[in-house]
Amino acid sequence: MGRKKFPLPNVVLSEYFKLENIIDVYPYGNGHINHTYLVEFPTCKYIIQRINDDVFANPFAVMNNIELVTSHIRKNVIYNGQDARTCVLTTILTKYGQTMAIVNDEYWRCTRFIEEGITYDYTDNPEIFEEAGRAVGLFQRHLDTFQARLLVDTIKNFHNTPNRYNTFLDTIKINRVDRVKECLKEIDFVNERKNKIDVIIKLLHERKIPRRVTHNDTKLNNIMIDKVTNKALGLIDLDTVMKGSLLYDYGDALRCGASTAEEDDVNLDNVKVNMEFFKVFTRGYLSEVKGIIVDEEIKKLVYSFFLMCFEVGMRFLTDYIDGDRYFKLTHEQKQKRPNINLERAKNQLKLAYEVEKNYQELTTIVNEILSQLGYRIVLDPEEII
Ligand code: ADP
Ligand code: GN1
Ligand code: MG
């Protein structure tokens, strides 16, 4: 029997490529959700991903959303005289002309590998993080003219924090793998804040802030930065593009990039708000969304930073209690970091606490930037969560 040459089935590869031309295939990137591989040819590369259909119940809807959104952005990018191959994801069709290959009940897709860009899991370069802010703002600007109703909610209630809190309570009640006893402190932390978590969802329901097209997963490694110039190219990982609040995208990017520690750092003393990074990201972001963002959204910018740390911390905690069924562990993690979801939860809840503690200073920074960029609104520096 011959050795298996590539880590993904030849039947999948052959939906897209002539096998004999492939030089190598290997796992790529550090996403938590899909299985991602790089396929190398002598002169070019492609990304192949298995869509996680435990998470995305309707992969067709995911691909349909992506096609609609990327076509819209591509049109704008070309209009601006920029390179659409680097600034937007390009879906590669199967040999039958489909956006997905369905092989043995698995859903696979392929995109052009954006070799000109790089995604960082972590950066200590403020110039890059300011560009990340621009990329998130620009994404919003591109989609300001897109009809949100065309998109399907690929994960219902994705950023509905009160809804996620109810799931958290149910998971504790069920206590499927008897882990509740290991997380009592973190559970208390979450419960103590249950009255602070419905602000954005309420504003959306009351139509005090607009429902927009948002990315919903703006962590740093979903933001493509030009390798040479360090300038923003665009956002990738578009599986969760759907209707939402722009506050989710602003807050989520900060939770990931404006921390002094990585998401799974176990030394909680390392986890603080990186004020400089908060400032540069906010500057990049607000310079792009000027004229689009409304005052009621601006008032909740700092809050959204708190909420996104809290929400994902609670999600990691819920999943740990539930036996790691959503954020699945790799083989290596099972060996070396079996409690990684609890570690991530502690880390992100600590960051939420740090945002609370520094709320007024963060508000002052937003005010400075608003004034520098010529916005009229001034936030109340005395406000706390
Ligand atoms: P996940 O949902 O698992 O996070 P992503 O779509 O974010 O999946 O892909 C995981 C990683 O693979 C990204 O963080 C990025 O580094 C890399 N990646 C994905 N698609 C591309 C692409 N078209 N070009 C370059 N890198 C990519
Ligand atoms: C997941 O797919 P990825 O790794 O970019 C998750 C996000 C979380 C993030 C935490 C669809 O993002 O919601 O904030 O992990 N994506 C999904 O790191 O659940
Ligand atoms: Mg990703």
Image: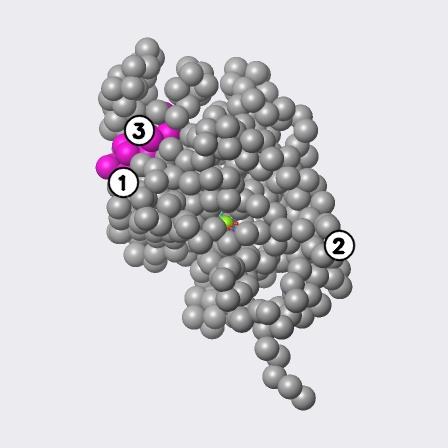
**Figure quadrant of residue 254:** top left
For this view, does 384 lie left or right of residue 96? left
Q: Position of residue 172 (x, y in %)?
A: 57, 49
For this view, does 186 lie left or right of residue 14? left
313, above or below 291, in the image? below
Tell me whether the residue at label 1 lies in contact with that at label 2, contact meaning CB atoms closer than 8 angstroms: no
Q: Residue at x 51, y 44 (%)?
A: 85
- Judging by the rendered image, the residue that carries numbered circle 2 is 96
Instruction: Decide: few, some or many residues near mark 3? Use Cα within 10 Å; few <14, some 14-19, many ≥20.
Output: many
Instruction: Identify the image quadrant of the N terminus.
Output: bottom right
Q: Residue at x 27, y 40 (%)?
A: 127
In this view of the protein, which residue sits in the foreground, 21 or 229?
A: 21
- Mark 1 or mark 2, earlier in chain: 2
Q: How far apart are labels 1 and 3 at the CA level?
A: 11 Å
For this view, does 276 lie left or right of residue 213? left
Q: How far apart are labels 3 and 2 at the CA level?
A: 45 Å
In this view of the protein, which residue sits in the foreground, 77 or 37?
A: 77
In this picture, which residue range is highlighted in magenta?
A: 273-286
Name which residue type carries label 2: Tyr
- Judging by the rendered image, the residue that carries numbered circle 3 is 283
- Judging by the rendered image, the residue that carries numbered circle 1 is 127
Q: Is residue 53 visible?
A: no
46, above or below 348, in the image? below
Instruction: Decide: few, some or many residues near mark 1? Use Cα within 10 Å; few <14, some 14-19, many ≥20.
Output: some
Q: Position of residue 7 (x, y in %)?
A: 58, 71
